[in-house]
Image (tube, rainbow, N blue to C red):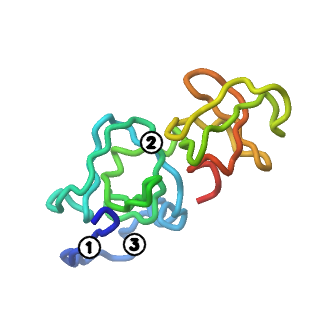
Amino acid sequence: MRRVFGLAALPALMVSAAAIPVAHAADTDAVPYWVSLRNSQTNMRVGPGRDYRINWIYGRVGLPLKVLREMGGWVLVEDPDGARGWMLTQFVSRKAHTAIVQGAIIEIHPNNDGSGPIMWRAEPGVIARMIGDCTGQWCKVDIDGRQGFAPAASLWGAAKP
């Protein structure tokens, strides 16, 4: 049930092509893209509207999500576990790019090629703020104010969606 979501028919609206803002069209062309949760409590619904039932309630600020589709102030998102559903755009942020450690415990190094001593380790589930784009197989991250380089392959939300 976790990965099941439905779409209901929405009432058709008569809108002229001239009334559609160019910026919205450009945003739609940009999917998929990464966002992170803004609030400590955010509902994921089975459809794009408040009348659809809630299938998940998220309680973690900064959790990375992949936006797959946009529709009238709502985004269809996928979480790190593969669950999909709809959220209001006001509850996600494109500015705070985050990633989550997946797999096994990873080592954080001081250099962008993974060289240097191990500065610390991060276990699965830790959320890292991304600093810039990844270079090669390594990404510069900030975890609770500590910066270093982590392997891109272990960070869900680091690669191009």
Mark 3 residue crowding within 10 angstroms, few (<14) / some (14–19) / many (20+): few
Residue farthest to the front, as pictured: 104
Q: Tell me whether the residue at label 2 lies in contact with that at label 3, contact meaning CB atoms closer than 8 angstroms.
A: no
Which quadrant of the structure image shows residue 105? top right
Q: Amino acid at mark 1?
A: Leu
Residue farthest to the top, as pictured: 145
Q: Given this view, does label 1 or label 2 mark the residue nearer the observer? A: 2
Residue 1, placed above or below residue 131: below
Q: Mark 1 to mark 2: distance in Å? A: 24 Å
Residue at the spot of label 3: 18
Mark 1 residue crowding within 10 angstroms, few (<14) / some (14–19) / many (20+): few
- Relative to residue 25, is residue 118 drawn left or right? right
Residue 65: percent from the left, percent from the top?
A: 46, 51
Q: Tell me whether the residue at label 1 lies in contact with that at label 2, contact meaning CB atoms closer than 8 angstroms.
A: no
Which quadrant of the structure image shows residue 19? bottom left
Label disc, if present, on residue 63 of the rendered structure: 2
Residue 93: percent from the left, percent from the top?
A: 44, 43
Residue 79: percent from the left, percent from the top?
A: 43, 54
Residue at the spot of label 1: 7
Earlier in the chain: of badge 3 and badge 1, it is 1
Q: Secondary structure at mark 3?
A: helix
Residue 99: percent from the left, percent from the top?
A: 56, 43
